[in-house]
Amino acid sequence: MADSPYPELKKSHVPERVGRPWSDHKPPPSAPVWAVIGGLGSFHVLVAGLELGVFDALSDRGANPGIPPELTAAELADELGLSAPHLEALLDSLAVLGLLERVSGRYGLNDTAARYLTTDGPASMASLVPVAPGPLDNWSHLADTIRAGRPAHPIEDNPADFYRPLVEGTFTTMLRAATRADLQLRYSAMAGPRVLDLGAGGAPWAIAILKACPEATAVINDLDGVIEIAHRTTTEYGVANRCNFRPGNFHTIEIEPECYDIAVLGHICRTEGPEGAQHLIARAHEALRPEGRLLLADYFVAPEPQWSPHSVLMGMTMMASTVRGFPITAAQTANWLKDAGFKALRLIEPIGHQYAYTATKPKGTP
């Protein structure tokens, strides 16, 4: 029998019809391959929608009483100064991706777009989307990176230029995760913890803890050129006066031993490779007081990678653009924590796809 051009629709290739055993092969559908092929275009469709202001334009109209939030492509093109037929193709693409509503030729925000893709959405990812994959050129040369064991243009060549937009883009998501983590970690019950936040970016973890604990203080570290973002965000959230900003490399800056109640390693371990990650964990252990807690947030790969596709691909993003970055597994991280002397390990998921290990430095540990 000839191979069906539409295997997902093939119903006749069964034992009752052709008399073959149940092990007879039915070719699988090609949908997973096409989904990957379409991924590149889908990403750029979303980036274009954000860059052109499509989501904010629809949001602004919906906020005005008496003005219908839905527009035709021609109406929106006129408002934004764009080519109507080209914009219609973009809007239809956003609709089939589930990122806009389209009803009878009129377009409006759906719940996903309103929450994540408008600039002032409650969990906006608008500034994250364009920078989340890292430098796009590195993906074009991924095969060369795998051959050589090193990307041609690693972000370590100019880390501040890469991390500034990434820190800006991830801040809202990370602050939500850090804030909701209190439901499981109860850091708000601590009287006045001293916090060490290494590679803090915009300092979402430090801000969440300082907001929950009015007597808390924090030492916030990141690179020159990045730490200025933490200056701004802590000021915006009214906690900057309780922060000590310490610029520099988190592997080498001075850290007082046994001075901190909470140490934070937020999404930095997968950038450092096994040796670098273990060094950071050891530094955190040394900095904590007995019974102090480490919060280590990252994308951890499950025992079977297919159980955690988001974590696998986020680790791959690091490998594509950094010298030492790789996916890190939950088991690997747990072993590093135990080897450093931590006890009482817990793995939590404050919001979807955002994980954090918490671990305690026991009493009597030097």
Image: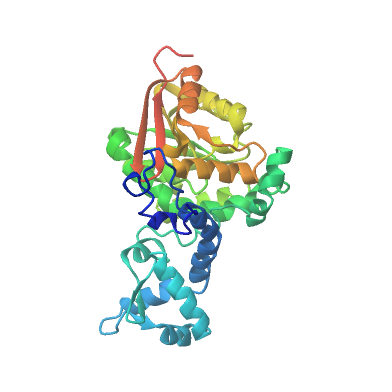
View extreme (top): residue: 364
Q: Residue at x 30, y 37 (%)?
A: 188
Instruction: Please say whether residue 200 is visible from this viewpoint.
Output: no
User: 86 left or right of 362?
Assistant: right
What residue lies at 50% left-to-right and 19% top-to-bottom? 340
Residue 128 x, y percent position in the rendering = 49, 57
- In the rendered image, is residue 139 in sight? yes
Residue 201, compared with residue 31, is above or below; it is above
Above or below, comparing residue 313 to residue 98 in the picture: above
- Image coordinates for residue 194, horizontal then vertical, percent: 42, 33
Residue 219: where, in percent of width, then height?
49, 38
Question: Total number of numbered labels?
Answer: 0
Q: Closest to the observer: 19 or 353?
A: 19
Q: Position of residue 329 (x, y in %)?
A: 49, 31
Q: Is residue 178 shown above or below 34?
A: above
Which residue lies at the image location 48% right of the left edge and 74% below the top edge? Answer: 90
Q: Nearer the viewer, residue 328 or 252?
A: 328
- Within the image, what quadrant is residue 245 found in? top right
Q: Nearer the viewer, residue 141 or 236?
A: 141
Between 231 and 148, the residue placed more toward the observer is 148
Q: Residue furthest front?
A: 19
